[in-house]
Structure formats: C-alpha cells, structure tokens
Amino acid sequence: MDSLFSDFDSLSESSSSEDQDEMESLYGGRARTIFSSLEETIEKIDDFLLFERVFMHGDIVCMVSEPLKQMGKVVNVDITVDLENIHGCKIQNVNSKNLQKIRSVSGGDHVVLGSWLGKVEKIVDRLTVLLDDGTKCELSSLGPEKITVLSPDLIDDPQYPFYPGLRVQIESSSVSKSTGWLCGIRKDKLQQGTICNVDAGFLYVDWLCCAVINGETRPAPPCLQDSKNLSVLSCFPHASWQLGDWCVIPTDEISPRKRPETTNFQQIGVIVKTKTKVDVQWQDGSQSLGLDSHLLFPVNIIDVHDFWPDSFVLENGTVDDSQVQERWGFVRSVDSKERTVKVKWLDSDEEADEIVSAYELVEHPDYTYCLGEAVFRTDKNVDVKVENGEEMTENLNDNFLSCFGTVIGFNNGEVVVKWATGATSKVAPYEIYRVDKCEGTTATSVLGDDDVQSPNEELPLKNQSLGQELKDVLGLNYDNTKNSSSASISQFAIGVFTSLTSTLFGSLGTSLISAYRCTSQDGQILGNPSEEDSLELCNSNMNDQLPLVDDFAMPEKITPAQNKEVYEDETSPFGNEQSETFRRFDMVNDCSDHHFSNGSGTDLQSTQVKRGWLKKVHQEWSILEKDLPETIYVHVYEERMDLLRAAILGTDGTPYHDGLFFFDIHLPPQYPDEPPMVHYNSGGLRLNPNLYESGKVCLSLLNTWTGSQSESWNPGTSTILQVLLSLQALVLNEKPYFNEAGYDTQIGKAEGEKNSISYNENAFLVNCRSMLYLIRKPPKHFEALVEEHFSRRCGNILLACKAYMEGAPVGYPFVCGNPEREIRKGSSTGFKIMLGKLFPRLVEAFSDKGIDCSNFLD
C-alpha cells in the first residue's frame, strides 16, 4: 500500500487519458477504486459539514445580508430530505409531506376525547409481530408477554425502543387474552418473529381544557386512554422533521428492485440531509417566497415593541393610568426603523388606518395567537346523543371535533383555524381561546428570565409592629408582686438605658428599647431582658458601643432661607440635585403604605440575636445619616425599625434623568446574614430590566439574581447604602438594555447598540409616565419632596422633551437654554409621536401644581 501511494504521488495532476489508462492497467483497477472511495468520502464530509438552519412556522428571522434592517415571520416551510434505511440504502429528494411517523402519536401531541382536549405525556407501544411460523399477532409492549430484542439496535433512539424490522422473542406462560391474533394461533410458549408495525397503544394524557356544554363543564376523562378512542390534533407536521429523525419511508419512494419481498413490513429510514425553503412575511407587509434557509438568520431577542402584520395590538394609554384605553386592532405594517405602526382599529367606527407610535402599543394579552397553536371554542351547539340516560361515547369525538383546532393563518383581522374535523374557517379572535391559558391547573408552567423567584413578596401578618409597647417601656409599669432583688436590678438597668437613650436620641432611643423587648407571635410581651443582658446592653452603650450624640444626632428641619444659596447655581444641564427643605435622612411615624408594613417585624426570639440585629440596624442608620449622596433620600420608621423607604433621583445622561424612583426596604430577622428585601414602587410600569411591574427587584447584591461571589451580599461588608448606590449606578444606568440577562454579550455590536437606543427611548417615555403617576399619587411622607423636586426640575424636564422631539437621542448632554446648540439626530419618529402626546400632559400636570409652565404652552 505504501508503494501504491508513492507511485500515485509521483503522477502529474494533468495526466492524459493515456496515462490514466496506463495507470489503470498497471494497478489492475485499483486506481478507480481509490478515486471512487475518495469521492464518496469527500461527499460524506461535505454532507456532514453542511449547515442547514431549521425554521418553524412563526419563527422570527432577518436577512443574513441585512441583519439590522426589518425582521420577518416565517409563514410557510417546505422541506426536502434525503433518507437512509437500516440497510444503508439512500433515497434522495423526498418531500417531507410524504413522510410518516413510526408511531401515529408522539409525546406532546394534542388529542381530543369528547369535550376535552389534552396533551400526550407517555406512550405504550402496540406491536404487530409476524412470527417465524407464519402466525401474526398484536400485543402491548408492556406485556403480559415478555418481549426480548434479538437483533442489534440499529436506530439507537430511546423514543423508539421497538420499530419495524426488529427481531424479537416473545415468551408467555400461557395463551394471553391480551394478545390479538391476526393470522393463526400461536401454540408454543416461546417463539421468535419480526416486528412489522409499531403504533401507539395506551396513552397517558394530561387533560388541559373542556369545551363547555350548555354552560356546564364535564368531568375530565381518566388519564390512561386507548389511542383508538382519541383524535389527534396536529398542524404543520411536515415542518417538524429534523436531521436524525426516524420515519416510515413512503412505498412510492422505494424503487421496485429495492422493495421488500413481502408487503408485511414497513421500511424505515433516518433523515441524513435536509433542504429547507421558507416563505417570510416582513414587517413592512411584503412577502418573500421560497427563500433558502441559509439566507436567513434566526432572531432570538425580540423587543416588546416589535410588531408584525396581522398581530393583534392594544393601545397602551399615553400617560394617565386611570383612563382606560379600550381601542384594539390589528397591524397592517410596521416601519421598524422609525418605530411606527399602521393599525386598523377593530372596535371603533374609524374606516381609515392610523399610523401610531410603536411605544403606545402592546400585544393584545388575550389575542396573542401563534401559527400552529392549539385553540378551542365553547359557543358551538353540540348535540350529544343520549340513550337510557347515558351519553353515546362512540359519538362524542365526532360531536366535539369542531370545537378544537389549530391556527394556520391570519386574514384581515380574523384567525384562520383548521379544526379537528379537517374543515378550515375564519373566526374573530374573541371567539376562540388559547389552550396554554388553561394548562396551569394540570401542566407545569414554564417561567422565563422575567419570573426569577424573588423574596420581595408581602410577608404574612405574624407580629404587631415594632415599638407598639413603647408606652409600657417608658412607664416602667412593673408588677410589684415580682419585686425580687434580681428583677429590680434588671428593671433598674432598663430604666437607666431608657433614660439614657431617650436623652441622647429622642424617639430613636425609645424605638431601640421597644425593638429590644421580646414579643410573641401575636405581638404580646414575653418579658423584659434578663439582668445580665440588661446590664450588658447598658454597659455597651456607656462604653460607646452605640454612636454618641455627635455621631447620630437627628438634624432639625432646614429652612428654605438656610439653603437658599445652594440652589442659585443652575448652570448644570439638569440643575442642582439637592433639595431645599427636604432632609436626606429622617425618621417618620406612619408606615401604613409601606409594602412590608403587614410583615412580621423583626420577630426576634433570641436576646443575643436581637442585640446583634439592633446594633447592625443602628450602624446602618448612622452610615445613611452621614454618607447619603445628595441624590438619595431615606426615611426610617419610629415604630418599625425593620422598615425603610428610599427615593433615588435619576442620573444625568441616562433615560432616567430627573425621575424619582421609590424603594421600600425590609430588614429580616436574620439581617445581616441575609440581605434586605427590596420592593420597587412601580405604579404598574416597567422601566428597567431589573425592575418589574410587580415591584420585584433583581440584583445580585440582594441575592435575587445570579452573580459572582464578589457581587453577592456579604454580611460583613455589604450595607443598605451599597444597595441604594447600586440601584442608582448599576440599574438606572445610561444603557439599561444590557442589564437584561445574556444581553451583555451584545455590548459594542451593531445589533445590540441599535436595540439599546430603542430601549432608551421607551425607558424615557415610561420615566415620564412615572412622573405623572408620582405627581398624582406621591408616597406618604415624600409629598414635599415630590412637589419640591418637580417644581425645580420641570423646566429641565420640558426642555429635554422638546430637544428629544427635535431629534436629540435620549440622554444626550445638551445645554439647556442654548438655542444654537448642535443636536445629534438619533430619535425615531415613533418616539417623537409618543413624546408629543406626553408633553402636554406633563405641562398640564405641572401647571395644576402651581408651577409656571407658560413658556411651554405653545
């Protein structure tokens, strides 16, 4: 062989036919074998390396050549496949519509039984076996017969433990009644044969929804069902084939010379190559037909304000959440660059289409239908036959098949549905229901990155608020019947500590005493601290374990005259952030509107734990009082030391500039071993990937999101101030789009920067809506801050809005009051349209608060 390759290498690539004939005669035909083998090997390598993208109906795509332009939705898929059977024979260019599954039912298929629709979870195979003696039987893969596989497992697919052509041995102790004999009767206990057909036998079904009959819902059928009694609800089965799938080869595709001698066996094969062509409907309403899949690229990141023709949308209201917006319709076309949408409203008398901003639309929550999705309707008058008081089971499926179907398209505001009967019709979107909306009762819901579990839930009411026993502590109402010497010492220590803390810290000191006392689950006093604990606590304070008066004295209210000079400088583009009269750190009394006000308090049961908790809270207060920046304000509560409320001002250069954002904080009993619980007062608005409408805050520092050890909460070093600064700098930043999980990989890429600009536009619009919400409903104890802040900042806010409507990108550091400034164009038309609707509302809201906005009334 070495000499053969040595001789072959010495030949010239441009050998003549005579040289080739001479070479062929020299090697006795071996050269031809080498060439053919090499060609076959290269072909196999090419087939293996060929990358074929797989697309399904409804997938979002873009052109590989134009990834930053408009997107489209796949509306049709045509697949041609090459097959190879278990003997190695190839069949090329088979239309996937002609392929059949080895089993007629697969896991995940929807099935209908009577008025119920369910999803197949598990399958028991029903096998047809041709025994070697010529008899033929049908039996279940679960027995009672024992089935042993004799031939090697060629397909190696756990989905198909049995398949046509597999040699098996069947063993039974006696003639089984469960075996159906199709030809002859087996007499031997042990016999071998070949599987000639596999189909679904018994199915385990998870029942999802019921079509109501005369206003009543029928009981769900048993989960275990014979497949013969069920109707399969399928749609676009030809588009689900993928490389490596096994199937039944159509008889027409098998050449006569390669067909099996007997027709008792199905031929099966594996898909070794696919070629996909798709039809795409683009956002602008145009269509491209028969595109090769390699020309398209899947889009996995979809903005909430991206829409496609025929999708149903709901008007999202401009600003005032108290005004219910009821207009809904469907999309005609979308300008993805300018963020505008042409909409046909279906609930109004308007005949003409309207071009609106994409930012004022949301996908209709009840009419979000996808191609291939299972749906049902309940308004059908089903005639159920009854004999002798019982329904005729054999007719149930036929009666209800017209109630279940799958979405196959959309047409001018209607949904095209293919029903289980095989008929197709168009229905209004409100006439049908999505099956997935009914799956919660019996099927496990899949949570997205937006549903990460957070501890920021309302706590159950277990204890009365801290400090409610304050008057008892201050009164020192001791029981005279228990005036032992030890008790007197303990009581005396409490009295000394109470007097000391009241003198040094006023109401703060009384809160410390109140919080220190042990309480039961219902808030009743369990007792005063022991003599040892009382003396130790008193000594610890006498030895400066708690800060002295100079370290933690609460400042008095600052008058406007005292701080007037601070606010005369208005040279900053967005003004000075410090408040005139509102203190950055203060103590208040009423926490009734706090998100965690109905919680359990600190619920401290161990004196040692309580002492450590109090000291830590006291340290946190001291840090906040001394080190809070000018753009963050914090309130603590006299009766609840475990609660805080913070107001954070949006930073310049971000889409959150000039905004106020409020956070409610709870310090759990295990604090600081556990991080604080933080709730964002959203007003029902979503303005950041880390801040949800529900108030959930996802942040590594709070252990509500995954992060490295250095980013997570550290009981020894992490503080409340660190949390607040992280929210301001890391969450409310200049490019919040990249805060979304996994989106950081797009930083610096054209697609990521494009999406970031769109996200910033929407974030500023939501920021404006948040301003309007706060003006209308300011948080308790922060009313003065809200009014004062917007009184000073309204000019900057409105000037920024005008600059954005002129084309400045959001967060652009323009200089207010300079009419000759050069503005870099960057905002979209849709953003300007939406901001144009918000602007007069802002002017109106500011004017209603007595703020002079006359310069902006035009």
Image (tube, grey):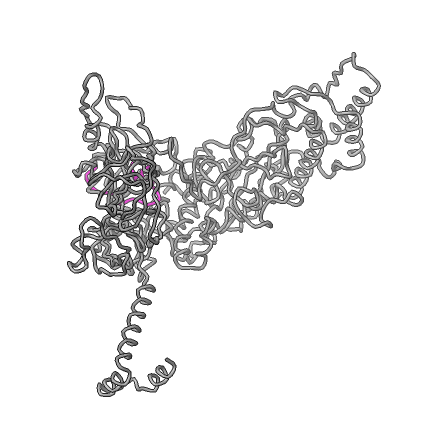
Place residue 716 in its image quadrant. Answer: top right
Q: Is residue 603 left or right of residue 60?
A: right
Q: Can residue 430 be seen here?
A: no
Q: Let me know if residue 535 is in the magenta part.
A: no
Return the residue nearer the eye: 425 or 317: 425
Return the residue nearer the eye: 790 or 223: 223
Q: From the top left corner, tell me how far across and down residue 453 is, in percent.
A: 49, 38
Place residue 840 in its image quadrant. Answer: top left
Q: Is residue 641 left or right of residue 743?
A: right
Name of the residue lying farthest toward the right: 485
The residue at 30%/41% (across/down) is: 125
Q: From the top left corner, tell me how far across and down residue 569 is, in percent.
A: 56, 48
The residue at 69%/36% (across/down) is: 618
Q: From the top left corner, tell me how far across and down residue 98 is, in percent.
A: 19, 51
Q: Is residue 573 left or right of residue 401?
A: right
Q: Which residues are magenta?
A: 350-368
Return the residue nearer the eye: 519 or 190: 190
Q: Let me know if residue 361 is in the magenta part.
A: yes
Quadrant of the frame with the N terminus: bottom left
